[in-house]
Amino acid sequence: MGSKIRMKAIMARCVPLILLALLALPVQAQASDNRYAGLVIDYDSGTVLFEKNADARRYPASLTKMMTLYMTFDSLERGRLKLDQAIPVSRFAAGMPPSKLGVPAGKTIPVRDAIYALITRSANDIAVVLAEAQGGSESKFAQMMTDRARKMGMSGTTFRNASGLPNPQQVTTAQDMARLAVRLMRDYPQYYDMFKVRSFTYQGRTYTNHNRLLGNFEGTDGIKTGYIRASGFNLVASAKRDDRRLIGVVFGGRTGASRDAHMMDILDAGFAQTEKLLVAKAAPLPSRKPMPEVRPQVVVADASASVKLADEDAMAEGDTAAVPSTTALWAVQVGAFGGESAARKAVATAQDSAPKVLGAAQRLIERARPEERPLYRARLVGLSETEARQACSILKTKKMPCVPVPPEDTLSVASLPSRG
C-alpha cells in the first residue's frame, strides 16, 4: 500500500514536468509567423493547455463551414428546415469554385446530404445552397452568421461568405473557433455526431472526410479542416479519452500532413495531464513558449495506390498551385524490408543523416507484393532530381543504401495517413 501511495505521489510530480518538456521541444516551422496560431483547451473546464497567437486574427478558410453548420442545426431545431427537405441549387451556388459537389442549377439536394457534403467534401456550392435556404442570399446569411458569432462571444470573427473562400475581410481567431466547436457540441449534440462520418456517398460517388485524424488519432470525433493559400492549412479537432475531451485549433500549417502531426502533438501534450486536479490548477501557457516539435509525416500505402502528390485539402479547395511540378516528384529509396518498423527506422535515419536535402521530404512506407509476404519499401518523396541524386551521394558516403527514384516510379497516396 505504501509503495502505491509513493508511486502516485511520484506521478503527480512527474506529469506536469512531462507536459512542460513536451511543450518545450524545438519547433519545426509550420508556416510564416503571420499565419500560425495554435490552441488546446479542456472542453469541460475551458482551461487553456496550450496557446500561441490564439487571439490573433487569421483567415478561417473552410473552418467557416462550422458556423454555416451551426446556423443550419439551429434552423433544424427551430423547424425552419427539415433533414429530408429538398432545397434548391441556384445558378449562383452552382457557379462556386471547387471544392464542390457539382449539383446542377435548378436541381435540389436534401438538407441531410447538404450537411454531409460540407463535413466531408467541404463543398463550396452546397455551403451557398444552405446559406440561400436560410438567409435568402449568401451575403445576408453571412451577416446573420456574424451577428450570431458576436452573441456567442466570438468578438474577433467576421464572416463575408458561407464557404470560407478567400475574402480579406473574413477573419477569425483560434480562440473563437474553439468557442464555436464547444457550442456545436453543447448546443446540438444530436447533430454533432455527423462530424464523425468517415465518408459520404452522393449519387453513386463517395467522398472521404478530409479530417485525417479520424481513425488515426485516438479519441478523435471531428470536426473540420480548411485551406486557402492566404491561411495555410487549418484544423479544428476534438478528441475524447475516458472522461476528458480536448479541443485543438491549428492555423497556418505548411502542409496538411505537418498540420495534422502538429495537432496530434499538442493534443497528446494536453492528454498527458491525466490528473483532474492538475487540469483544474493548470494556467494558460505564455505565448513565448515554443510549439511542440512537428513530427515528420509517414504515409503507409499500397503499391497499387493512385498517384496524387498534392495535399488533398489544397486540391479540394481548388488551389492548383498546390500541385507540385514534375520536377519535385522524385524520391529516394533507402531500403526494402520485411517489416514496417524496420522501414520506418530506415527513413528516419536517412532523413536525419542528410537533413539539408531530405529535411522537408515526406516519408513514405510502400507496401508491395500484396499476394505474398509483404515487402515494405522505405522512401522519401517530394524531391527534385538534383536533390534525390545529392541525397544518395551523401547517404552512400555514410555507407547507407540509397537509390534515386524518378517521377514515373514515384508513389504517392490518396489514402489516410498513419502516424509517424
Image: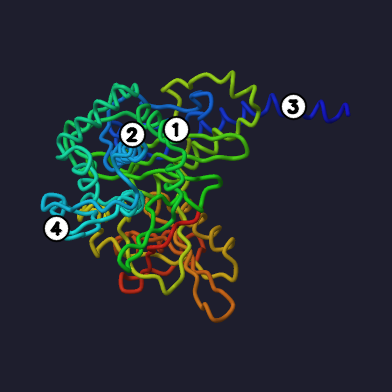
User: What is the three-letter code of the residue carrying label 4?
Assistant: Gly
Q: Of callouts 3 and 1, which one flags the residue occurring earlier in the amino acid sequence?
A: 3
Query: Residue 306: which disc?
Result: none
Name the amino acid, label 3: Ile
- Secondary structure of residue under mark 4: loop
- Can you tell which mark lies on residue 36? 2
Q: Is residue 173 left or right of residue 350?
A: left
Instruction: Tell me the kind of residue under disc 2.
Output: Tyr
Q: Alpha carbon of mark 3 to alpha carbon of mark 4: how far? A: 67 Å
**Image quarter of residue 102:** bottom left
SS of the residue at dot 3? helix
> Tag on residue 291?
1
As measured in the structure, the alpha-carbon distance from the residue carrying label 1 to the one carrying label 2 is: 10 Å
User: Residue 329 versus residue 50: which sits nearer the camera?
Assistant: 50
Q: Quadrant of residue 294?
A: top left
Determine the secondary structure under disc 1. Answer: loop
- Specify which label sits upstream in the sequence, 3 or 2: 3
Which of disc 4 and disc 3 is earlier in sequence? Answer: 3
Give the residue pinned by disc 4.
Answer: 106
On screen, residue 309 versus residue 214, left or right, reads: left
Label 1 or label 2, whichever comes before in sequence order? 2
Report the disc number at residue 10: 3
| Residue toward you, 260 or 173 | 173
